[in-house]
Amino acid sequence: MSEASNTADVRQLVEAVRAAGELASQKMSETHSAREAALGASRQIIRLSANSIRAAHRNEFADASRLIAEARQMVEELKGVRADHPEVFFGGFVEDSLKEYVEASATLAFTQGSPLPTMQELGIGAAAYMNGLAEAIGELRRFVLDILRRDDVSRCENLLEIMDEVYAVLVTLDFPDAVTRGLRRNTDVMRGVIERTRGDLTVALRQRSLEDQLARLADRLDSDAG
């Protein structure tokens, strides 16, 4: 090979490297912009979802629904990120925000007594959806404890039944963590949450039964004394 042809080959390689660098810079810039936008949307979804759950705990269901609707708009914006930059969408933080969105949607449905939105209706993948349902169990425990303080035992039993049913579905999803995004660990945690809730409800029911028996005994003693 002549020196001239060797020089030409080197120039072509240099130009190819430079072109690759320019293209990489452009692509990475686009990915960075998409990531920044996705981070902002994800933070908004998490904030709106958390506020919706707080509103639901206060039985302010209209406000909770409005906040869910606002979060839904942010979720729609992320669809473009999934199509154009899947490496950003599946990087972890976006799916975490979608899980919070599902948790808020499920919490509202369970506590308000409205239909549970499906994953298709929410536009959410199976892993994020089921993890969101799992974490809604923790919110239902909070509801049960709040309701126990108001002595509304019948509603507590209904919420515990929902918790049990969610768990019964979760344990059937026996897939690797790479598929479920840590669902098995989440399910194990929620089993403990349910058992503690069942224990609290059982204690409350026994206490209520004892109080009723004591009240009947007091009435009988008053009647005998009279």
Image (tube, rainbow, N blue to C red):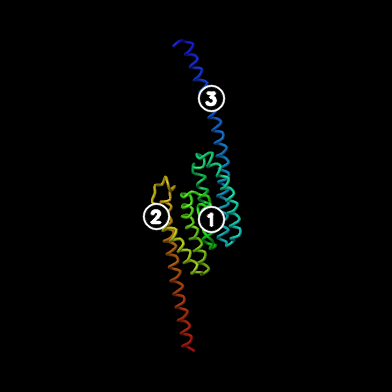
Point out the image quarter for the N terminus.
Answer: top left
N-terminal of the pair, mark 3 or mark 2, is 3
Seen as rendered, the residue at the extreme front is 120
**Percent coordinates x, y for residue 161 in the rendering:** 45, 64
Given contact means CB atoms under 8 Å apart, are the residues at marks 3 and 2 in contact? no
Near-viewer residue (76 or 199): 76
Q: In the image, what residue type sits under mark 1?
A: Ser
Q: CA distance from mark 2 to mark 1?
A: 22 Å
**Percent coordinates x, y for residue 4 in the rendering:** 49, 11
Query: What kind of element bears circle 3?
Result: helix
N-terminal of the pair, mark 2 or mark 1, is 1
Going by the image, does 59 lie left or right of 134? Answer: right
**Percent coordinates x, y for residue 156 in the rendering:** 48, 66
Query: What kind of element bears circle 2?
Result: loop
N-terminal of the pair, mark 1 or mark 3, is 3
Q: Which mark is residue 19?
A: 3
User: Considering only vertical position in the picture, is 208 above or below 43?
Assistant: below
The residue identified by callout 2 is: 172
Q: CA distance from mark 1 to mark 3?
A: 48 Å
Q: In the image, what residue type sits under mark 2?
A: Thr
**Percent coordinates x, y for residue 217 in the rendering:** 45, 81
Given contact means CB atoms under 8 Å apart, are the residues at marks 2 and 1 in contact? no
Q: CA distance from mark 3 to mark 2?
A: 51 Å
